[in-house]
């Protein structure tokens, strides 16, 4: 579960929305609402800890930014992107190398007889 899910907010929620959501959740899960020692009380305490740590991260723009970075890196297919031809946009069979001009076999002319004949 991400901190965003814990607080029930969208990933692009504003600081104001984060605060509002946090406040309503804290009220909702306040351990004082349940008798000490009962199951709901223990669960509520656990939940409020998650909410507090989520809010601690997301309420500060710096720690939120680094958390976002972490989330993005945790996504599948991170790092290596499939390579696409710069000319026709078709995927090549390679992984993308940043800064390199990429052409598929057809555009690069390695399999195209047309290019050679057209001149
Ligand atoms: Zn191409």
Image (cartoon, rainbow, N blue to C red):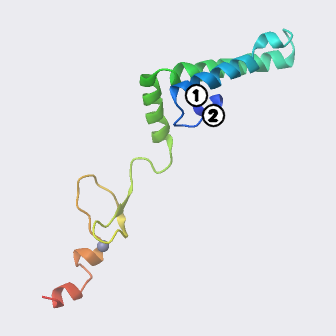
Q: Which numbered dot is residue 1?
A: none
Q: Quadrant of ligand 1?
A: bottom left
Mark 1 Cα shell of 10 Å, populated few (<14), some (14-19), many (≥20): some
Quarter holding the N terminus is: top right
Q: What's the residue at 23%, 74% (across, down)?
A: 108
- Looking at the image, is 7 positioned above or below residue 36? below
Q: Is residue 46 left or right of residue 77?
A: right
Question: For mark 2, what is the residue?
Answer: 5
Question: For mark 1, what is the residue?
Answer: 17
Residue 30 occupies quadrant: top right
Q: Point out residue 29 in the picture as x, y percentages from the top left corner.
A: 75, 19
Residue 64 in sight = yes
Mark 2 Cβ and ligand 1 under 8 Å apart = no
Q: Point out residue 85 in the picture as x, y percentages from the top left corner.
A: 31, 67
Contact (Cβ within 8 Å) of mark 1 with mark 2 = no
SS class, disc 1: helix
Residue 36 occupies quadrant: top right
SS class, disc 2: helix
Q: Nearer the viewer, residue 80 or 84?
A: 84
Mark 2 Cα shell of 10 Å, populated few (<14), some (14-19), many (≥20): few
Q: Point out residue 10 in the picture as x, y percentages from the top left corner.
A: 58, 37
Residue 94 occupies quadrant: bottom left
Q: What's the residue at 22%, 79% (across, down)?
A: 109
For marks 1 and 2, give the CA distance: 13 Å
Q: What's the residue at 23%, 88% (across, down)?
A: 114
């Amino acid at each position: 579960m991400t901190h965003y899910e814990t607080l029930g907010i969208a990933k692009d929620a504003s600081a104001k929305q984060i605060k509002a959501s946090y406040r309503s959740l804290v009220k909702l899960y306040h351990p004082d609402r349940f008798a000490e020692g009962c199951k709901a009380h223990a669960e509520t305490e656990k939940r409020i800890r998650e909410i507090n740590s989520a809010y601690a991260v997301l309420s500060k723009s710096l720690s939120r930014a680094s958390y976002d970075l972490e989330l993005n890196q945790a996504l599948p297919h991170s790092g290596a992107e499939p390579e696409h031809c710069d000319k026709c946009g078709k995927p090549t069979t390679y992984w993308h190398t940043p800064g390199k001009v990429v052409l598929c076999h057809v555009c690069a002319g390695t399999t195209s007889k047309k290019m050679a004949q057209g001149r």
